[in-house]
Image: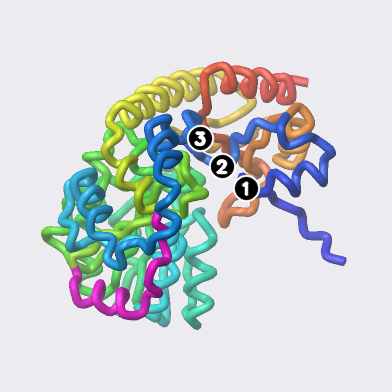
Amino acid sequence: MSDKKQVYHGSDIELIEKAYGVPKEKIINFSDNVNPLGVSDTVKQKLASNLDLISTYPDRNYTALRKKIGAYVHGDPENIMVGNGATELISILIQNLQPAKAIVVGPTYSEYEREIRLQGGQVQYYGLSEELDFQVDSDHLITHISSAIGLLVICNPNNPTSSSFSQKDLVKILDHCKETNTFVLIDETYMEFAQNQEELTAIPLLGTYDNFMVLRGVSKFFSAPGLRLGYGLCSNTTLLESINQQKNPWTLNTLGSFAGEIMFEDEAYIQKTYSLIQEERTRIYEELLTWPEVHAYPPTANFILLKIKKKHINTTNVFEKLIRKGFLIRDASSFNFLDQRFIRFCFKMPKENDQLLLALKEILTR
């Protein structure tokens, strides 16, 4: 029997219910990094009125959806491809590139490494410095990128650190990778939560560089992980054509495509999300800075990474005590470069955030 510690993902509610005996209805999920507003009423109402769409095939080219995405991100629809979540696009991009060696900037999401290894590639991690609050030193990073590296993977803002790359950093990295013929995958799943996203996003650089792809989706910001709508932006038309030839048709269903067309125009919901997350992110971070028991890393996204400073308390202790109180956070010790002192949780509604902070404070001060 393996004695490897079980680490739960935000989608593992049923497993947690079984393991800890806490009814899933009584668990507040601070681990899934999903917008606490839930799916907008506009989307719900229009989906409910158009369920007959199930009887039709989606447009193979998703023309209307790509136009809506293009307007939303200020990008060319011809540079946009959609898929069954960003996960499908990660998989098919790596299948197409077939990198012999890749660098993944970490600690980060494990799916990148998994897909690279499935294609026979070697993975090298570049560790963000804890001393720099996990902010990138782009000059140092590019010294590790040679012509032997076929792919560089960046998550921006990064999960689980909530740190970010500036657009200036990305320009420096893309210039260097152009010289080494290294393709760059930039996962912007959490970009829309950032307060200063115009200074961080790589999308405006698509007109200058064709050696990268940006990935986004609706799972987190639009609170719709069940729709499985992801999209990628890339100005390398040869690569896009190759991917589209490999990609299975209709991987995004008709309702998912229809919902996406509505979501990207739901300005009231978008602005309400901006306001909620920015207010709660600032409030919670400033509160945590006053706690001697933890170190809070500056958050860019809708979640925050904490390092427990108090002796004799580790992530397992905190996770298990919180879950028995009905709060699910992320034990971050399963991420590369992080140990038994790191936890992550997302920002929810103010009342729920206050309840979590109170419970966490009680655990840390006993």
The disc, 1 or 2, on the residue closer to the chain's N-terminal end is: 1
Mark drawn on residue 260: none
Callout 3 touching callout 1 (CB < 8 Å):
no
Q: Is residue 366 left or right of residue 187?
A: right
Could you tell me which secondary element the residue under label 2 belongs to?
loop
Position above or below: 271 against 228:
above
Q: Considering depth in this image, is 179 or 1 the residue closer to the camera?
A: 1
Q: Which residue is mark 2?
A: 32
Q: Residue at 30% across / 63% down in the picture?
A: 59
Q: Residue at 50% across / 22% down in the picture?
A: 284
In magenta segment, residue 242: yes
The disc, 2 or 3, on the residue closer to the chain's N-terminal end is: 2
Q: Which residue is mark 3?
A: 304
Number of other residues with Cα within 10 Å of mark 3, as a class: few under 14, some 14 to 19, many 20 or more? many
The disc, 3 or 1, on the residue closer to the chain's N-terminal end is: 1
Position above or below: 237 against 202:
below
Task: Give coordinates of residue 157: x percent, y percent.
Answer: 38, 45
Q: Residue at 75% across / 44% down in the picture?
A: 16
- The quadrant in which residue 352 appears is top right
Task: Give coordinates of residue 254: x percent, y percent.
Answer: 39, 56
Could you tell me which secondary element the residue under label 3 belongs to?
strand
Residue type, numbered disc 3: Ile
**Closer to the eye: label 2 or 3:** 2
Residue type, numbered disc 1: Ser
- The quadrant in which residue 98 appears is bottom left
Position above or below: 76 against 197:
below
Task: Give coordinates of residue 1: x percent, y percent.
Answer: 87, 66
| Colour pattern | rainbow
Q: Which residue is mark 1?
A: 11
Question: Bounds of the magenta span?
Answer: 236-254
In magenta segment, residue 42: no
